[in-house]
Amino acid sequence: MNRLVRYLAAVAPELIASVTTMGTPHQGSKVADGIKRDAAATTGLVAAIVDAFSSFLSWISGSPGLPQDSLAALQSLDTPGAATFNARFPVGSRRIRWRSIAHRPIA
């Protein structure tokens, strides 16, 4: 959800008064970094399994056409991916009140 709110705050700040996040990896996830580093040899296999399971969940929820890309999700959650997204969509408007609980700062 952090990505959606940050994107919206960057492109349409007039729609948002305040944002409070809880435990959100604004600066990236060390878990995602570890998975990419330690499981590089099996990442493709695991991604195929996760994508298949996600497609199944999408199908039973009534939206079978939704794309699934667990590798892209992992890349967006690692530290470099978060840094790229944050640079592309900075916090922006100072009229928006930003709060982060139980994690590193939003900036």
Image: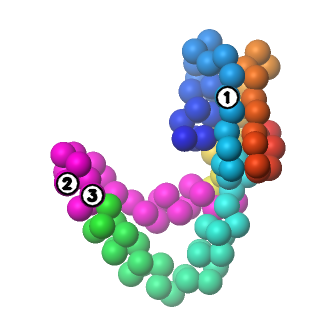
Q: Identify the element where label 3 is drawn.
A: helix
Magenta-colored stretch includes residue 40: no
- The residue where tag 1 is placed is 19
Q: Identify the element where label 1 is drawn.
A: strand
The secondary structure that most of the magenta stretch takes on is helix
Q: Is residue 57 left or right of residue 83?
A: left
Residue 1: x %, y % from top left: 54, 41
- The residue where tag 2 is placed is 59
Residue 68: x %, y % from top left: 34, 57
User: Mark 2 or mark 1, which is nearer the start of the sequence?
Assistant: 1
Question: Where are the magenta residues, as a range?
Answer: 55-79
Please name whichever residue, 18 or 4, is drawn nearer the observer in this view of the structure. 18
Q: Amino acid at mark 3?
A: Leu
Few, some or many C-alpha atoms within 10 Å of disc 1 (few <14, some 14-19, many ≥20)? some
Q: Amino acid at mark 1?
A: Val
Could you say which quadrant of the image residue 48 lies in?
A: bottom left
Could you say which quadrant of the image residue 19 lies in?
A: top right
Q: Is residue 57 left or right of residue 77?
A: left
Residue 40's mark?
Answer: none
Could you say which quadrant of the image residue 8 lies in?
A: top right
Q: Is residue 94 left or right of residue 59?
A: right
Q: Amino acid at mark 2?
A: Trp
Magenta-colored stretch includes residue 57: yes
Q: Residue furthest top?
A: 14
User: Mark 3 or mark 1, which is nearer the start of the sequence?
Assistant: 1
- The residue where tag 3 is placed is 57
Q: Identify the element where label 2 is drawn.
A: helix
Q: CA distance from mark 3 to mark 2?
A: 5 Å
